[in-house]
Amino acid sequence: MLDDERQQPEGAEESQETVAELESSEAAEAVTQEAPRRSRRERTGGGRNAPAELGPPTEPPPPPRLYEQFKTTIIPAMVQEFNYDNTMEVPRLQKIVLNIGVGEALTNGRAMEAASNDLTIISGQKPVITRAKKSIAGFKIRQGNAIGTAVTLRGARMYHFLDRLINTALPRIRDFRGLQRRGLDGRGNYTIGIREQIIFPEIDYNQIDKIRGLQVTIATTAKNDAEAIRLLELYGMPFIKDTVEA
């Protein structure tokens, strides 16, 4: 019995060799077929779920033009005019606040969203929703109702916005003859009321739902109105010249 089991047919070894050769040839063909696919995936980034390739690092944005003007021109002029003992006493911009009152949001739910989108486009920063601090029966306002949207700009965005406001937006106002000086509050802060948001070139007239006004408040570190008005004049703010009554 053992001898019979050990004995194998004559063609068994040949059949095993042919099977091994077929398997090796099929594996080689599979590798050659998958090779161009892998190389193509590597060229395209590795498939659908592969992360997008990042480009070369870009250069940082240039510093604000008005900030460079403040350091090179405004500080020496203010020190000479007001006789400051130290350059750190020169007043400077602190922040700029943009505010849109949306009283119609009590009856129109989309008005607040539209006003927020306009303010986002103008300032380049997402605004916050302002709510009523107390109830006013005459205006049908309850405490906590959304009545407006506001955004506060500081740093480089503040200087960029002021540059666009002075040199681009204000000259687009119809029959513009200058800004009034009565917008000062006595503590170095100046407020401008703008009737139409379309004076900013970023706003597309065909994309807005209605004309809205906004309020721009420029807060400075000036101790009085004289220093604040002179600081804004040196920045290029177009104020109406004082007229002496006869």
Image (tube, rainbow, N blue to C red):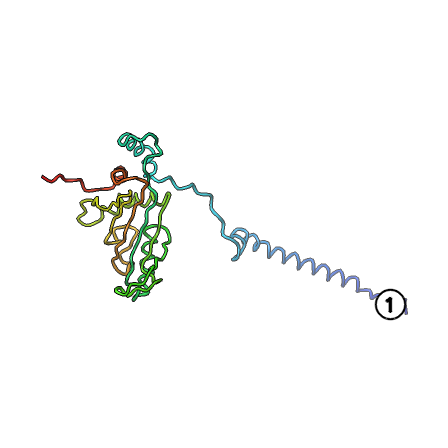
- Residue 74 locus on image (x, y percent): 30, 34
The quarter of the image holding the C terminus is top left
Foreground pick, 150 / 4:
150
Q: Is residue 187 above or below residue 204?
A: above
Disc 1: which residue: 5
Q: Secondary structure at mark 1?
A: helix
* Neighbours of disc 1 within 10 Å: few (<14), some (14-19), many (20+): few
Q: Position of residue 124 (x, y in %)?
A: 36, 50
Q: Nearer the viewer, residue 246 or 42?
A: 246
Q: Residue at x 21, y 45 (%)?
A: 182
Q: Is residue 153 above or below residue 244?
A: below
Answer left or right for 178 relative to 144. left
Please state if 87 lies on the left or on the right of 46 as rendered.
left
Residue 22: quadrant of the picture: bottom right
Classify the position of the N terminus by image quarter.
bottom right
User: Where residue 42 sits in the image (x, y, percent)?
Assistant: 55, 51
In this view of the protein, which residue sits in the foreground, 239 or 186?
186
Q: Quadrant of residue 15?
A: bottom right
Q: Locate residue 24, reporting x and y percent.
A: 69, 58
Picture quadrant of residue 86:
top left
**Residue at the spot x=79%, y=64% of the render?**
12
Total marks placed: 1
Q: Can you name the residue that lies furthest to the left here?
A: 246
At 33% from the left and 29% from the top, the residue drawn is: 85
Residue type for callout 1 = Glu
| Left or right: residue 9 compared with residue 89 | right
Q: Nearer the viewer, residue 148 or 116?
A: 148
